[in-house]
Image (tube, helix red, strand yellow):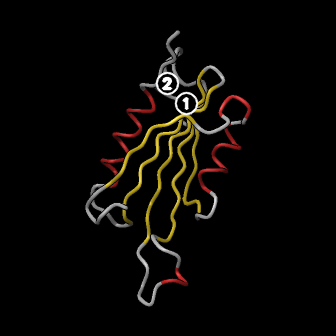
């Protein structure tokens, strides 16, 4: 669990990566949340890096609303979904809604996604 004023950035290969489409991977990671935006990022992606790169921002309750007697805070998830050599790599940023540094966290994750390369 993250605290207010903190963020989490994680990088991983998606489960079932080679057999799943990029759209299926995105659907898996955004299930149970409200998608706020989705865009394909085509510029600045190196030839040996991601052949497809999609940014998806979603919102979810930090705890189940029905389990809390008080107003529930929300988490913003920003996922960068990269397909490279048939594999799907996910860079996921989590921070509290209205965090003043959200854009900074997203920029770091975007740079991480753009730096993904497969090595043999």
| Occupied quadrant, residue 30 | bottom right
**Residue 28 against residue 98 in the figure, above or below:** above
Q: Count neighbours of disc 2 (C-alpha within 10 A) and say few if under 14, some if 14 to 19, many if 20 or more.
A: some
Secondary structure found at label 1:
loop
Instruction: Point out residue 38 in the picture as x, y percentages from the top left corner.
Output: 58, 50
The answer to whether residue 28 is above or below residue 20 is below
Q: Is residue 35 above or below residue 54?
A: below
The N terminus lies in quadrant: bottom left
Q: Residue at point 44% right, 28% down?
A: 114
Numbered circle sitting on residue 66? none
- Residue 19 lies left or right of residue 75; in this view the side is right
Which residue is at 42% across, 25% downward?
115
Which residue in the structure is indicated by mark 1? 42
Task: Assess whether mark 1 and mark 2 are in contact (beta carbons under 8 angstroms).
Answer: yes
Residue 107 image-quadrant placement: top left
Q: Which residue is denoted by mark 2 in the rendering?
A: 45
* Residue lying farthest to the bottom in this orientation: 69
Determine the secondary structure under disc 2: loop
Q: Position of residue 97 (x, y in %)?
A: 39, 66
Where is residue 91 shown, x and y percent of the image?
A: 47, 40
Q: x%, y% of residue 86?
A: 66, 24
Give the residue drawn at x 53%, y 15%.
Answer: 47
Quadrant location of residue 17?
top right
Residue extending farthest to the top is 120
Q: Residue 111 versus residue 39: which sits nearer the camera?
A: 111
Q: Count neighbours of disc 1 (C-alpha within 10 A) and say few if under 14, some if 14 to 19, many if 20 or more.
A: few
Q: Alpha-carbon distance for marks 2 and 1?
A: 6 Å
Q: Nearer the viewer, residue 56 or 15?
A: 15
């Amino acid at each position: 669990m993250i605290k207010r004023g903190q963020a989490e950035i994680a990088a991983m290969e998606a489960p079932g990566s080679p057999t799943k489409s990029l759209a299926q991977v995105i659907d898996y990671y955004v299930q149970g949340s409200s998608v706020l935006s989705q865009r394909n990022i085509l510029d600045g992606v190196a030839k040996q890096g991601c052949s497809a790169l999609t940014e998806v921002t979603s919102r979810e309750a930090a705890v189940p609303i029905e389990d809390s007697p008080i107003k529930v805070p929300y988490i913003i998830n920003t996922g960068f979904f990269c397909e490279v050599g048939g594999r799907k790599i996910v860079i996921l940023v989590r921070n509290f809604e209205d965090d003043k540094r959200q854009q900074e966290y997203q920029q770091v994750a975007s740079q991480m996604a753009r730096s993904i390369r497969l090595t043999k």
